[in-house]
Image (cartoon, coloured by chain):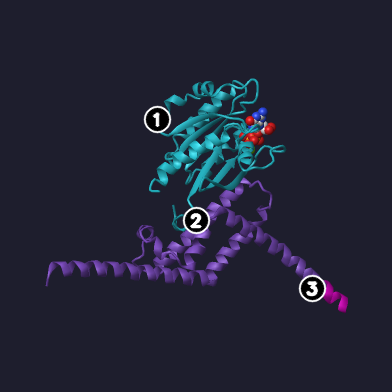
Amino acid sequence: MEPQVDEDIDKGSKASADDIKFDAVVGELEDMLMDPYFNELHDSYLSKHCKEFTDDEENKLVYTEIFQEYVKLVERFIEKRLRARLEWFSMAAFLQMIKGRKESLEGDVFDVLGSLADFDAFKDLMLSYKQEQEGTSIDLSGLLSVHGAGQ
Amino acid sequence: MGLLTVLKKLKQKEKEIRLLILGLDNAGKTTILKRINGEDISSISPTLGFNIKTLAYNGYKLNIWDVGGQKSIRSYWRNYFEQTDGLVWVVDSADRPDRFADCKLELHGLLTEERLSGASLLIFANKQDLPGALSSEEIAELLDLKTIQTHHWQIVGCSAVTGENLLKGMDWVVTDISKRIYMLD
Ligand SMILES: Nc1nc2c(ncn2[C@@H]2O[C@H](COP(=O)(O)OP(=O)(O)O)[C@@H](O)[C@H]2O)c(=O)[nH]1
Ligand SMILES: [Mg+2]
């Protein structure tokens, strides 16, 4: 066999090993976004802190602390989960890998995860949570009074 | 930087630059921010938290953060250092003489911060429209700018009220940053 050919096979198999790992991580991340456990963690953090937020143009200093803690919380959750499910997973290696393959980051999962690190998007999310929380109680009371009227 | 922040950066479609505006309270930081964003500057109250503006500038998307400068909240400045490409330090050139020592101390303190080590530094010697204002040369002297070796820096005398030289300062900082981080285009 010619050395040239060996090299090509080596390169090919290295690339496809990376592809397999990458795809495995993407699959896990997609599952995670659908997982009620993750969504509950997310929701409970948001509903716990959304009362702090107002739609004033000026932001309070505490928003930044809430936001930075949220990003850390989600990042820790992701790392723990990936390590539990993929024994070879290393966050440092994965970060290195994605920096070298920007073109593979087209999927929705990366849009969603990247948007979680955006402060403006976070503030909007908090405000809509707050509105929803307030809105829910108004809806309920409306419902009750309708029932009351029918009796 | 963790996974989410790395992803956000990798997925950026536009060329983004993050600027952090700091300085003592009452220097004119918020007025400068609103002025360059084309907003009304007649009723600005002291900043207790922070403001963010996103604007398009010479083909870049600028994210500008303006954090309150009162003594009691300066310890929070550190929460805003991450990913800063440019620091804009605003000085009230007509301030009380005793405040310049404080101003110099705070500025030189920031320059030792690891997370600001790569940032370009623009100093706005603001309120040049006031009769008692010191010139930008005098401010440079008072703040001991010539000893700064760690950062690219530039001082520009300006007025947020008349708008004088604001664009000159912004042009310098954006050009300096873009040469560094977007060198390839
Ligand atoms: N004459 C003059 N007043 C200014 C200028 N810039 C800001 N001010 C005034 O200085 C005060 C403090 O401004 P502000 O933007 O709130 O300062 P900050 O605390 O640094 O954000 C306000 O009353 C402004 O109207 C300027 O260039 N010239
Ligand atoms: Mg202000």
User: Which residue in the structure is indicated by mark 1?
Assistant: B149
Label 2: element kind: helix
Taking depth in this image into account, of B127 and A69 the one nearest to the observer is B127
Question: Going by the image, does B51 lie left or right of B112?
Answer: right
Label 1: element kind: loop
Residue B152, by quadrant, is top left
User: Which residue in the structure is indicated by mark 2?
Assistant: A72
User: Answer yes or no: do the residues labelled 1 and 2 have beta carbons within 8 Å?
Assistant: no
Question: Going by the image, does B12 lie left or right of B35?
Answer: left
Q: Residues within 10 Å of mark 1 (few under 14, many from 20)?
A: few
Callout 3: chain: A
Q: Residues within 10 Å of mark 3 (few under 14, many from 20)?
A: few
- Labels 1 and 2 within one chain: no
Whole-number angstrom distance, CA of label 1 to CA of label 3: 68 Å
Question: Going by the image, does A18 lie left or right of A5?
Answer: right
User: Which residue in the structure is indicated by mark 3?
Assistant: A143
In percent of width and height, residue A73 lies at 51, 58
State the purple chain: A
